[in-house]
Amino acid sequence: MDVFATPIIEAVKVSFPPLKSRVLYLVHYKKSVENLKLKAEKLTLRRDDVRQLVDAATRNGQEITGEVRSWLKEVDDIEAILKRLEEGVMENKRCFKGWCPNFSSRYSLGKEATKTMAVVDGLAKEHFPHVAAPRPCPSFKPAGEYEAFECIESAKERVIKALKEEGINIIGVYGMGGVGKTTLVEQVGKQAKDEKLCDEVVKVTVSQNQDLKKIQGELAEKLGMKLDEENKDVRADRLSKRLKQEKKVLVILDDLWDSLDLTEVGIPCGGTQKGCQIIITTRRLDVCSMMNCQKNIIEVKVLSEQNSWNLFKEKAEVVETNELQSLAREVAKECKGLPLAIVTVARALRGRDSLIWDNALEELKQSSARNIEGVEKEVYSRLELSYKYIVSEEAKLCFLFCCVFPEDHNIEVGLLMRYMMGESVFNGVNNFEKAWNRIHTLVEKLKDSCLLLDGDKKGCVKMHDVVRDVAIWIASRKEHGFLVKVGEELTEWPENLDECKRLSLIQTSIGMLPERTNCPRLSTLLLQRTNRWEEIPNNFFEGMKAPVVLDLSETKISSLPPSLLYLKNLKTLCLDECSCLNDISLLGGLEKLEVLSLTKTKIKELPIEIRHLSKLKVLDLTGSDDLTMVAPNVISRLTKLEELYMGNSFNEWEVRGSSGDGSKASFEEVASLARLTVLYIHVIDVNCLCLEVPDPCRWEKLKKFSICVQDGWYPYDYEKCTAINMMSYPLSKWVKLLVERSEEIELERVPVSNIVHLLNDGVSFNSVKLLKLYDCDEMEHFINTVEESHRVPPNAFMILQRLVLHWMTRLEKICHGRLPNRFFGNLIELNIISCVKLKNILSYDLLEGLKSLEKLVVSHCSELEEVFEGMREEIHAAITTSPLSTLKEMKLACLDKLSCIWKGAIPPTGTFHNLTRLTLYACDSLRCLFSLVQEFEYEEGMREEIHAETLLPRLETIELSFLPKLTKVSGETPQRT
């Protein structure tokens, strides 16, 4: 072959220079693959070194930079490409029945190998001064309502003044329960951050029973790091180092009941070392002294009579001319100036008639509520009054159920609902779709009454510690039958449980469970987070006949006792994060079970016995990533199933059922479940997309869903999501229905040249708010409206808020042709990474439609020359509005050929005027930010340099790294002509 090739190549060099490289692709395809292998091996060694640094940084609680994550992904992609090319060389395909080499195949191999070598060279040139940075602290946001009354403002100003004084490390804030200490210090934290008195603010609740590991864990979470170590000293050391990485941190320790050793926690404070400022809140003055607050002790006093009335009047919606005014004033006085009592009583009486107000006043005057240390009896009695005036018995029981969790706990509303459904609390509700609506309504009512607060996490609520104390006090009465010993130093199983109906022993120190219990009336038993025992005695449940709710989550039990089958009426069973539990076949005997939760367990198999749970409505296997076997004909037998959660769990679904030995569950079984309203499922076999299911329109009943058809499962931002890898055609009707209803869509390696092909195929994007496209190698434009055959539906992408384009190797333009009106009108964020053929991100025609864009991220686009394309001369004079006037954040990184951000004329006003954060990193060719700046007000002959403050008046943060050629903000500033 070489004998003939050499003269051919030489002739081509002379006659057809453009064909030289093409012939070389064909002739030297093997050598090209070998050269690629050598370069890739060196790159892989460097990648392994980088990964070691990444692993070390991750263990230290640092956040890996986006550039490093992207670089590692690209190197992994190179390995996959090399493997495919080597397989192609080994196959050595031939054509014409084997008589002739397959020149087309060899040409493709040589071309791809050569192009990939260029990518490898580019990756090898990239250097990272650091692979990670400390994780940013989550934004600190005050949770409670804040009223700026004199006494509150005075205390707040004194705390702020103390923070500003040199040498003050610990400040004590004390006052009775319900007076507003927590809300006050949260406002102090917000003001301190706003005034830059500190870099970060973190708040941790300590509570009565100090749990050092819990405090450390919460502090770490607020700092954006994770503590996996068990040893408290090691955890403290890591926390201390993390806190010292910040210039100045304000740590708020809320609700101290005793002294706390800051060194044991890991909080550096005092001396000449770099440390933290501390604010503590407590109901006990002596705690301030024990914590060495010295003279920095600020008391939060009750409200004055006038301030109390003003607050009460606002919350109860009483007007000065109202006939209830005098009565309302009397009620307000009885709240004794305590904001928590004022707000809750006012909300409870709002809109009630005068008889109810009269009765409330009498109850407040005659109250004999017990006085528990740190909580005035007035608070108890007034909060109890708010409880009494909850109209719904369901809401009252919902309120009481919230007290079974630890103090300051983020209570998952979904878990609360599962408990209450097990107890059959909701009258007339027999399905979980209605239960979700009911629990949401109840929770909102309790929040409106100030008996519940918004939680720190999505889907969660919290209880004020004083409100929780009152709830436990009420719940312990005989008619309710609650016994709550959460987090207490309880070492023995409690006695005299004959009348107990609901028993919460969460996070106790019970060393051993009794052989047999006697709890004849017990309906709910909560034993989660108790790690002192590894097994449950065989006869433990024999003395329980009535339980309908059992929670054993986060325990170390390795097996289920036979006596569990005595719980014939059990409806809700939670075994979440039971990492030692393997065999769950016993559960098949609990025939009345309606909710089975097995999230983040280590079970490997969902046994065939589960098919006997004919009444099961909720099956939750989220995060059970060791689950590799689901027996066939199990899922399909659960005909009453309404909610199925299998995200990041079993994913090896067969397309259709099989009767062969050892076969697994099929996607067809899932599709047969007629009552599903919630479905979270991960599927690897893309052929499931082609499965025609019976009555596909029933999938329109899904209220929440995440359908992931790809290799990995990712956390999603919305409740209606679809993720598809290698979309297979023809798409079934059920797939199109789900995509049409999806708020988040992720498409990977979809074989279309632009998104309009999918639109024309009946795939609608009318509901999508977040669209992610990954590795779509055939896509040349995101949208192409030039060709007549490409019809864009008028409603497509109208509500799209975030667009992500990653690793689109053939993408040349985002938009080719004129966009429909309002096409990108609601787009807030645009994120583009590793689109190597893009030379320009946003043309001016496209910019005109971006009315809401706030964030732009562009990185690893090696051919990008400018980010924005300037206006054409003929439209420059006619322009009346400025594009990008809403842009707040822009990040540009690893763009080798970028010479300027904006090439051409910038409109006179508005453009970039709201930009507050600008990050530029590793743009080797960047000489100036703007090549041309056009101002309309110039007098003839005037020339001047445009400064950053003119173009970027609101810029607060600018990060510039590895920009060797950047010398000025703008290039030429022309005369007005």
Image (cartoon, rainbow, N blue to C red):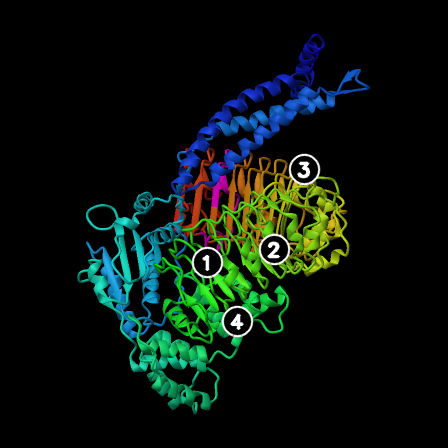
Q: Residue at x 34, y 57 (%)?
A: 193
Q: Would residue 440 be found to the left or right of residue 656 on screen? A: left
Q: Residues at badges 2 and 1 in contact (C-beta under 8 Å)?
A: no
The residue segment tinted magenta is 891-915
At mark 1, the secondary structure is loop
Give neighbour class at mark 1: few <14, some 14-19, many 20+ (Cα, 10 Å): many
The main secondary structure of the magenta stretch is loop
* Residue type, label 1: Leu
* Residue type, label 4: Leu
* Residue type, label 3: Glu
Q: Residue at x 67, y 14 (%)?
A: 14
Kindly tell me whether residue 881 is visible in this rendering: no
Q: Is residue 908 magenta?
A: yes
Q: Earlier in the sequence, mark 1 or mark 4?
A: 4
Q: Residue furthest left?
A: 295
Q: Which residue is mark 1?
A: 527
Give neighbour class at mark 2: few <14, some 14-19, many 20+ (Cα, 10 Å): many
Q: Is residue 957 magenta?
A: no
Q: Which residue is mark 2?
A: 619
Give neighbour class at mark 3: few <14, some 14-19, many 20+ (Cα, 10 Å): some
Q: Earlier in the sequence, mark 3 or mark 2?
A: 2
Q: Which residue is mark 4?
A: 442
